Amino acid sequence: MSRPDGVTLNHCDAGQASALLDPLCLLYDTVFSQPPFRWTDDESERHRQSLIRLISNPTFALVTAEAAGELVGFAYGVGLTSDTQWWSGIAEPLPDELRAEWKGRTFAIIDVAVREDYRKRGIGRALLDVLLASRPEQRATLTVQPVATDTKEFYEHLGWQRVGTTKAPEGAVSPFFDVYLLPLHAKP
């Protein structure tokens, strides 16, 4: 795993993540309030409350990127449970084998953000590499707003496979999201 020059990547536990809540939310707002992403007036507060809930999840994992003492990127997610609704809104029929969940099967990446002036330096890839290398799950999943074509190309370049489009839950910033999967480890 290569580390971008001048950037420090850090695994953070729940306490460290809680201490970074304000900088994480500020960077989220800065990145995702800009085109091509869709943004609503209440998205900043919705994200903050969602992140607070996620940090309390025992499967929560966060990796941050810092340069010159500032947060310039992050990636975080949680493990899916057997009763997840992650796959329920997908419009395309998916095989039962793909939709089945159990403890330790799937890690869901919830958000990845890199400050604009630090993009195209390998930080996004490094964040994902470090985060996913630490996970015991068999596979990872994430969603992307359909309008974010550069973001989708980035994930596809890294080997992620689009498996469908899901209807977003009420209050989400976008009505639909493209769903991606990436194998991590073979079945035990």
Image (tube, grey):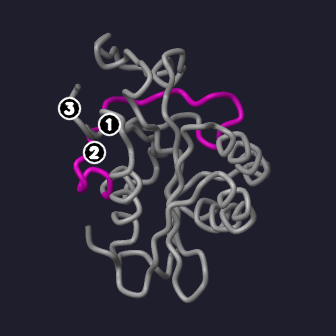
* Circle 3 or circle 1, nearest the eye: 3
Q: In the visual, does 117 lie left or right of 149?
A: right
Task: Please identify the quarter of the rendering in which residue 35 is found.
Answer: bottom right
Residue for point 50% across, 61% down: 11
**From mark 2 to mark 3, how far is it between C-alphas?**
16 Å
Name the residue tied to disc 3.
186
List x then y, in percent, for residue 147: 46, 50
Residue holding disc 1: 181
Q: Secondary structure at mark 1?
A: strand
Residue 72 in the image: above or below residue 59:
below
Please, what is the three-letter code of the amino acid marked with disc 1?
A: Leu
Q: Quadrant of residue 2?
A: bottom left
Between the residue at mark 3 and the residue at mark 1, the CA separation in whole angstroms equals: 14 Å
Instruction: Tell me which residue sits at (56%, 43%) in the image.
Output: 60
Give above or below for 137 relative to 125: above
The tally of labels here is 3
Do the residues bearing badges 1 and 2 touch, measured as CB atoms within 8 Å? yes
What residue is rendered at 33% in x and 76% in y? 3
Q: Quadrant of the C terminus?
A: top left
From the image, tell me which residue sits under label 2.
Answer: 160
Instruction: Please provide the residue range marked out in magenta.
Output: 154-174
Mark 2 vs mark 3, foreground winner is 3
- The amino acid pointed to by label 3 is Ala
Circles 3 and 1: CB atoms closer than 8 Å: no
